[in-house]
Image (cartoon, rainbow, N blue to C red):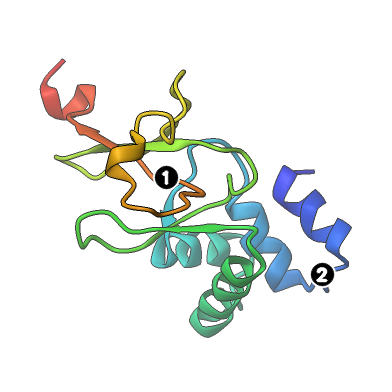
Amino acid sequence: MSDLLERLRGRGWRMTAQRRVVAEVLAGEHVHFTADEVLERAAALLPEISRATVYNTLGELVSLGEVIEVDTDGRARRYDPNAHHPHQHLVCSGCGTIRDVHPDADPLAGLPASERFGFTVSEAEVTYRGLCPDCAGG
């Protein structure tokens, strides 16, 4: 069973067939599907699933904090089930591929007190950009 499914069961989330399929589609590492990609994969497993059900389920998962909504450069929002493991994103500027990365340094440590302007900083989101091997031709 996937980490996401286990977390949802632990919360007592009502697991309908449709919700289960959406959670199964989101299982795995480096998963950053758009809502339409989730729908396409879910429909392959459960043909009667509707667009509204997929979109509503994604919205619920985001509201619960079980899935992160990732928005990069005005492209379609993507959904990341790796919500409980601190990480950053590496985004290909060419094709939009997103990978989870775990830098050695804490991004908060890189912001000196003089640049915090009195804020009590609680988190940081860092997005690394570049070209993936396919787009770079290598």
Of the residues under marks 1 and 2, which one precedes in the sequence? 2
Q: What residue appears at the point 49 percent right and 80 percent down from the top-left corner?
A: 51
Q: What residue appears at the point 16 percent right and 15 percent down from the top-left corner?
A: 138
Classify mark 1: helix, strand or loop: loop
Assess disc 1: are there few (<14), some (14-19) or many (≥20) residues with their C-alpha within 10 Å of its C-alpha.
Answer: few
Which amino acid does the dot numbered 2 rest on?
Answer: Trp
The answer, for residue 16, to whether it is visible in the render is: yes
Front tag of 1 and 2: 1
Residue under numbered circle 2? 13
Q: Which quadrant: the N terminus? A: top right
Q: Quadrant of residue 28?
A: top right
Q: Quadrant of residue 35?
A: bottom left
Q: Nearer the viewer, residue 91 or 37?
A: 91
Position of 94 compared to 72: left or right?
left
Residue under numbered circle 1? 124
Position of residue 104 relative to residue 84, above or below, is above
Q: What residue appears at the point 20 percent right and 42 percent down from the top-left corner?
A: 95
Q: What residue appears at the point 35 percent right and 63 percent down from the top-left corner?
A: 77
Position of 49 compared to 106: left or right?
right
Assess disc 2: are there few (<14), some (14-19) or many (≥20) residues with their C-alpha within 10 Å of its C-alpha.
Answer: few
Position of residue 45 relative to residue 130, above or below, is below
Position of residue 85 measured from the top left corner of the image (x, y, whole percent): 61, 38
For the residues bearing labels 1 and 2, Cβ distance under 8 angstroms: no
Position of residue 31 measured from the top left corner of the image (x, y, whole percent): 49, 44
How far separated are the C-alphas under marks 1 and 2? 29 Å
Position of residue 131 relative to residue 12, above or below, is above
